Amino acid sequence: MILHRPASDNAALMGALLMISAAMCFAVMAVFIRYVTADLHPFEASFFRNLFGLLPMVPWMVRHGASGLKTERFKLHFLRGVLGFGAMSCIFTALSLSPAAQVIAINFTLPILTTVLAAVVVRETVRARRWSAIAIGFVGAMIVIRPFGQSFETGAILALGATVFMACAMTTVKMLSRTESANAIVTWMGLIMTPLSLIPALIYWQGPTVWQLFILLIIAVTGTAGQQLLVRAYRTADQSYVMIFDFLRLPFVAALAYVMFGEVVDFWTWAGAALIIGSALYIARREAVLAKRAKREANLPTTAPADPQAIPVTRVDRDASAKDKPDA
């Protein structure tokens, strides 16, 4: 299935390479989270992730001062921070409990949940075909989680909860982006999430070793690098095209987890992931088609007359007028 024909081969290749690099960064981040949370509590690990992730924004804060953070929508910023804190706490805990590939497979339901929230909260129109894709994706998630079988996994449920939090957070970001700059949104997120994550971290605090701090720094660096590469991939080529390569995160994570922990992905995780990925790709395709249609309609030249009381002259009228006009 061809989702989109990119504008040029160079743009397609660059977009693909950027997204593959982003997928590798996110895969390394997920596996290292699983590695470090074997000895360090997930709440403490998430605190250091937020703290180290805030450091790159310090130069921007120094350069712009208080004016850069001036906002009239602090409540929405705070809500976005709380949702991000919930997502990070759930995903770190899920990775400490369940195989990394299973958690990532469930995380692929993000576009599906975001579409649902867009319909409910932002009141975007979602028609029958996309609702069908959402239903298929939900079935895929249930296959991965298997909540009614003997292989019930608390980590899988937490992974789904993290994805719900992420989808809610993305919806608030859409609302904030109408009036706030990207740097302000990211900085406010760090300023809110860092102290929020410190509160539960103090309950389970244990002094991290130098090696653990190094791993936590790698997690922060790969997470930030992945986000930067993701944004550049979306700018270089069409989102519905580069999104295909984001799903390489699953085999990347599966390979790394096998090497580091000996984890083997079972058949049901692959089967459920296939349904989730298929539905997410269909939703991305529909979003691209609808966006192009809306853009095409917006660019159509108007045929309305300048005077609303005037009657437009048609070709038939012009032909009839030409016949009646005497020759010069």
Image (cartoon, rainbow, N blue to C red):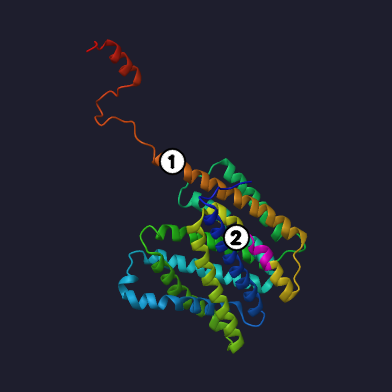
Indicate the secondary structure of the residue bearing disc 2.
Answer: helix
Q: In this view, does 224 lie above or below 294?
A: below
- Could you say which disc has been placed on residue 24 in the image? none
Which image quarter is the C terminus in? Answer: top left
212 with respect to 305 (left or right): right
User: Which badge, 1 or 2, comes first in the chain's sequence?
Assistant: 2
Give the residue pinned by disc 2: 246
Q: Residues within 10 Å of mark 2 (few under 14, many from 20)?
A: many
Residue 207 rendering spot, x and y as whole percentages: 58, 89
Q: Which residues are drawn in magenta?
A: 247-253
In reply to whether residue 183 is colored magenta, the answer given is: no
The vertical placement of 238 against 51, above or below, is above
On the question of residue 44 being in view, the answer is no
Residues at marks 1 and 2 touching, judged by CB atoms closer than 8 Å: no
- From the top left corner, tell me how far across and down residue 121 is, in percent: 47, 52
Residue beneath the point at 68% across and 57% down: 273
Q: Is residue 292 above or below residue 95?
A: above
Check disc 1 and give the amino acid type: Arg
Residue 27 drawn at (x, y percent)? 63, 69
Judged left or right of residue 299, residue 1 is right
Q: How crowded is mark 1: few (under 14 residues within 10 Å), some or many (20 or more)?
A: few
Q: Quadrant of residue 217?
A: bottom right
Q: Which residue is drawn at 42% across and 68% down?
A: 78
Rounded to the nearest whole Å, what is the CA distance between mark 1 and mark 2?
Answer: 28 Å
SS class, disc 1: helix
